[in-house]
Image: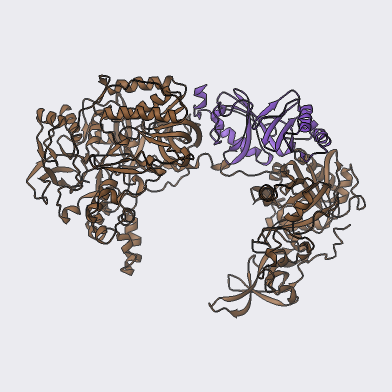
Chain colours: A purple, B brown
Amino acid sequence: MSNAVTALNGAKYSGLIDIADAGLMGMITLRGDLASAAMAKVVKSITGAKMPKPRGVEIAGKGSVAWMSPDELLIMIDYAYADSAVAKISSALAGEHHLAVNVSDARAVFDLSGDELRDVLAKGSPSNLNPDSLPIGEMRRTRLGQLAVAFWFTDDSSAKLVCFRSVGDHVFKWLSNAAKPESSPNFYSAMR
Amino acid sequence: MSTRIQTGGRHLDRSKQVHFNWAGKQLTGYGGDTLASALLANGELLVGRSFKYHRARGLIASGAEEPNALVGLGTGAKFEPNQRATTTELFDGLVAKPQNAWPSLAFDVGAINKMMSRFFPAGFYYKTFIHPRFAWKHLFEPIIRKAAGLGAAPTEKDVDRYEYFYAHVDVLIIGGGIAGLASALAAGQAGASVLLVEQTAHFGGRAVVDGVDIDDEPAEIWVEETLAALREMPNVTIRNRTMGAGVYDHGYATVYERINDHLPEMITDHAPNMDAPRHRLWRVRAGRIVTATGAIERPLSFAGNDIPGVMLAGAVRDYLVNYGASVGDRVVIATNNDDAYRSAIALVEAGLDVPVILDARTTADGELPTLAREIGIRVETGKAISSVKGNKHVTGVGICSQAGEGAELEEIKCDAVAMSGGWSPVVHLWSHCGGKLNWDADQSMFRPDPNRPPLGYDGAGFVHVAGTANGYLDAAGVMEDAIKIGKLAAKETGHKPKATKVPSTFSAPENPIEPIWQMPQGMSRKLQMKTFLDYQNDVKVSDVRLAAQEGYQSVEHTKRYTTLGMATDQGKLSNINGLAILADSLNAEIPAVGTTTFRPPYQPISMGAIAGDARGELFKPIRQSPMHHWIDTNGGFWEPVADWRRPYCFQQNGESVGDAVTREILNTRQNVGLLDASTLGKIIVKGPDAGKFLDMMYTNMMSTLKVGRCRYGLMCTENGFLSDDGVVARIDDETFLCHTTSGGSDRIHAWMEEWLQTEWWDWNVYTANVTEQYAQIAVVGPNARKVLEKIGGMDVSADALPFMAFKDGELGGIKARPYRISFSGELSYEIAVPASQGQAFWDMCMEAGAEFGIQPYGTECLHVMRAEKGFIMIGDETDGTVIPQDLGLSWAVSKKKDDFLGKRAQQRSHMVDPKRWRLVGLKSVEPNEVIPDGAYAIDGTVRDNGVKHMIGRITSSYFSPTLNHAIAMGLVENGPERMGDIIDFPTTDGRVIKAEICDPVFLDPEGTRQNV
């Protein structure tokens, strides 16, 4: 898999915040009964994380798992591990109606960091980015400018952002534009 | 003459000279000036020409309500028309020019319109539609339209940056006067998150100009202390130069921040801080919105009230106190209330002359009038202005009795008039989303009715009004109301207001206003024709009275008919005066006539702010395939396909697009071609009921498809019309992969989910859109197998991988799933690989295929090759009115299934009508003549309505290099029964192209080329 490249191909920008290609990430869409014990067990064995609460992201040693909807999870693990993890899920949930599919290549993933992160994201996302409304460890599926994205804070000033692969270039340009120096709305950052 | 006086000017920095250019003249102002105050200080009273009559117009107001002083600001890529001088902060190097005047402000040719004013009565524009007919073409359109109008549109691309910002707060407070500040403090102290915005650069509003005392000190001190306290609160955000623009449903508001309009470096195109956006449009979700927007003073309606030098009394005071600028040396005051006496007193205190105060009321014995008399000002009660003397500036006024018809009693020389017809609360933002108003007859004003607010999702009002905007004209009332409202807003958003002391607030008490809607009461029609209601649109008292006489009763109709309250100021000064005249003409009460609808934005906002960052490369997101960059750098000629870009063809060595397409077709048919098919939609459908579900979604049977095999399927809407098509592959017993068209992937996925979630929610089926997981690369042509065999990794022989089958394996070390499907009629593999390795696999194909003549091909080659094979294209052969049976696809419509989406519709009488136009091939009689796409076929008869009778139309049309012949597909009445007939296609240039009806499969009908 040495010839695998991300949509962002290592792109970086530094302005109000730092924007960087997060590299290849293994991602599995898992749909099914989120109350199932077998599902919780296989998710735990793959990621080390427990089942997330609605909108939550559980981060553990081997990977993380995000709640996407009442019947859907996003499992995030090493890129190389995705296919065998899908196989593992399929056999663990053999008796249950479910869908597990590798979507690692369908997305672009960004690492974002900086004190003005919420201010930059709020230039494009209509969702409430107040730390009370979007605490660390909660995923927000929203839009950024004209495009669907999801992001979650991993600490006070770092977040991961995921969008569809085909628009990774647009989202990168959008973020870089929104993060131009001297353009801070100084709204969330002033509350810190 | 207007000038700068030696004292005063709260906002001025007299140590800082600022140079600017007005109408080509170099002038000087001070730091802190607005363009308006600097013009006034330079004696530039004449600032514009009116819209219709090109009358000389001067500054009339000091803020956002100014109707006259609209200027063209900046030059080149920084030019912007219709900017208000009153809201433009002066900076070094500012360039402004007047509008609507040619050749110059002082001598304007268009002013001849003024002499024709009796030809432009109310509704003149509509009347020109009726008669005389010749005048429209020769007079109205070429001459009058040219003479009318406001600023010119910019001709260069705007170089500035703009952005949005989404904010969520408990309480949004609009207005930074003492009401807004007090509300913000009360809400902030209660713990609510607060956004406080003020449209000007300065806080404090009128209180700091009008001599209000708070806690026994000038209001200014309280304002500074309160601002300092608010800035200490982490839960409070404060923005000046930021205007509440609009209030919408459920606590949504737009707020317009002008970040650097006031900075001198912004006039050059290469300023160091060009990164800063010029404007930021805040899109705020607020639990509660408090509008503390103050009030706007009304003009008085007397003859000549538009002559430069006539100004609102409050504005006279503003210029004096804030900017040390006087409108004139001798200022006559005309009023119907006590507040205007403040201006008189301020003028006298500044050493200027007030020859007389004309108070239309019969008595004036309040505290302020008494003070005015004490300092020696002549006060005449029951008196009015009969007319203002002068042309380009005021030279005097005639005095008459308010009660009479305007007989002049005395003429007084003066160079300015300060007028006040009372104050109207700014209720715009309250009204935007449906807040209702009451008429307060005592104060002669519309004020918000707190019992009829705009309602939120929970049925509760979400806007509160505080202070003067709420109808409180005395400072103490303002303060008490504002604190109460601030606490209420905090409480309603879940916070606990603290007990606070209301600061003792004092302003001079005022006696009641007397409503005066025209001056004098019985003014003649001749005077009415010189008495302006709407300065920006040149609407006079006579126009509104004429409209009423002609039968206009609704204020909304009268607005359109007379243009009262239209254009950039939306009647901020004229609204109440105009509807009062209308009410009087109709003999109705003012509240019965009502106001026109208040609509956002409160004041015009820049187009750039509305567009935000969606411009240039961010204008519209473009979807890119994993091979996008390679295609871009290897001659790809892009065309938009849904939100994707796909290469129409690959141009080599300077060849034309047409030559490239021909080369690609011949090479693919003779050797091997490579197509990026990644954009095709791919949807996984899985579950015990997946087969049953797909049998409903597709017209043909999918549940019988064997694992490892592919089947072409059609999807229809409930109305039977074709919606999408594609190849379905069965991955395992419970899992299918459905290919959709490139434009259909999101739509079809949503379509499937809609049926699963709303109708068949008890079926066990999950779907996932995996379109972007895969790069899909088609290797097409007689040498296709050789290319894949050279790359190696899995058996792709005809036995191992027959036509309409797929296999999972590896090619060149990359996990691959080749499908033996063909949209070209050639031996063809469509290989799905992980998107991240798409480029790597593409490179392998190009390298391995070199010896076999491989060349990439684009969408046009794909289109021609499929047309040669008679394959339909969704969007070409279909247009939302076409059913599968029209296209000879009955074989793909199951007759065995009980039901599928569209089945019942396809049985309706019109759908089974044998006269429906059906698909045929068409070969031009002249082999090189390509029939235009969309051309209609005629049979030579004429319909009753005189139109040629049409019997069909072209859906796809190409020149086929393979057949060396023009070919087309089309829908023709009785087409399949008319094989061999020649039919006529007239063209738009008057020729007729003849074509023979034939089978739509032009090439290899047996399928021997693909099935090898």
Q: Where is residue B427 in the image (x, y as percent from the top left)?
A: 34, 40
Q: Which of B929 and B492 is in front in this view?
A: B492
The image quadrant of residue A161 is: top right
Point out the residue furthest to the right here: B799
Task: State whether residue B14 is above or below residue B953.
Answer: above
Residue at x 11% of width, y 41% of height = B362
Q: In this view, does B501 lie to the left or right of A112?
A: left
Q: In which quarter of the image is residue B395?
A: top left
Above or below residue B360? Residue B241 is above
Is residue B50 in view from this perspective?
A: no
Q: Is residue B616 visible?
A: yes
Relative to residue B566, is residue B159 drawn left or right?
Answer: right
For the N terminus of chain B, the image quarter is top left
Q: Nearer the viewer, residue B112 or B810?
A: B810
Looking at the rendered image, the quarter that the C terminus of chain B falls into is bottom right
- Compared across the picture, whether B225 is left or right of B633 comes to left
Residue in view at x 62 percent, y 80 percent: B940
Q: Where is residue B445 in the image (x, y as percent from the top left)?
A: 27, 41
Label tally: 0
Residues B567 and B700: in front is B700
On screen, residue B179 versus residue B774, left or right, reads left
- Residue A103, given in percent of the width and then of the height, sits at 74, 38
x and y percent of residue B213 in the render? 25, 23
Note whether B148 is above or below B285 in the view shown: below
Comparing A156 with B46, the one in front is A156
